[in-house]
Image (spheres, rainbow, N blue to C red):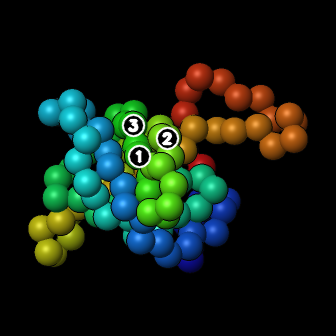
């Protein structure tokens, strides 16, 4: 796709996810639609502010406790259905201790 800046392949998923709402300061259930090593796509009833850091609880299996994680909202658009499609970016991580990691998030 022209203009695509993705480093990691996006894979479809259907995880149970809770996002800590920056408005209500409580967790809200959303639907995941795709993920990669760099981020996560979700569908929500409401938008999230661009650039906002959010806390996540990702339930990949009913057998295990949810995985806590953080992400940054990098894009958001309202679909024809009225729901919001939102792109979240995971914080940078070190691969084999070769990559420096700062406190800031960087879109991939």
User: Badge 1: few (under 14), some or many (20 or more) residues near its Cα, within 10 Å?
Assistant: some
Work out whether mark 3 precedes mark 2 in sequence or the reverse, and give the earlier one. Answer: 3
The answer to whether one can see residue 105 in this image is yes
Q: Residue furthest left?
A: 82
User: Label 3 vs label 2: CA separation?
Assistant: 6 Å
Give percent across and percent down for residue 42.
Answer: 36, 61
Q: Quadrant of residue 27?
A: top left
* Quarter placement of the N terminus: bottom right
* Residue linked to disc 1: 57
Residue 21 percent across, percent down from the top left: 24, 38
Cα distance in 3D space between marks 1 and 3: 7 Å
Residue at the image position 21 percent from the left and 70 percent from the top: 79
**Closer to the camera in the image, 60 or 3:** 60
Residue farthest front in this picture: 63
Q: What element carries label 1?
A: strand
Q: Can residue 60 be seen in this view?
A: no
Query: Measuring 48% from the left and 40% from the top, which residue is drawn there?
Result: 68
Q: Residue 55 carries which label?
A: 3
SS under mark 2: strand
Report, in whole angstroms, how far the alpha carbon at label 1 lies from the one at label 2: 6 Å
Up/down of 95 relative to 3, above or below = above
- Foreground disc of the pair 1, 3: 1
């Amino acid at each position: 796709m022209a203009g695509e800046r993705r480093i990691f392949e996006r894979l479809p998923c259907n995880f149970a996810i809770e996002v800590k709402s920056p408005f209500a300061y409580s967790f809200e259930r959303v639907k995941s639609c795709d993920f990669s090593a760099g981020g996560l796509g979700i569908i929500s009833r409401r938008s999230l502010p661009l650039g906002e850091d959010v806390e996540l609880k990702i339930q990949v299996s009913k057998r295990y406790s949810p995985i806590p994680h953080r992400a940054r909202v990098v894009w958001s658009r309202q679909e024809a259905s009225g729901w919001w499609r939102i792109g979240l970016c995971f914080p940078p991580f070190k691969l084999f201790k070769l990559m420096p990691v700062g406190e800031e998030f960087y879109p991939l």
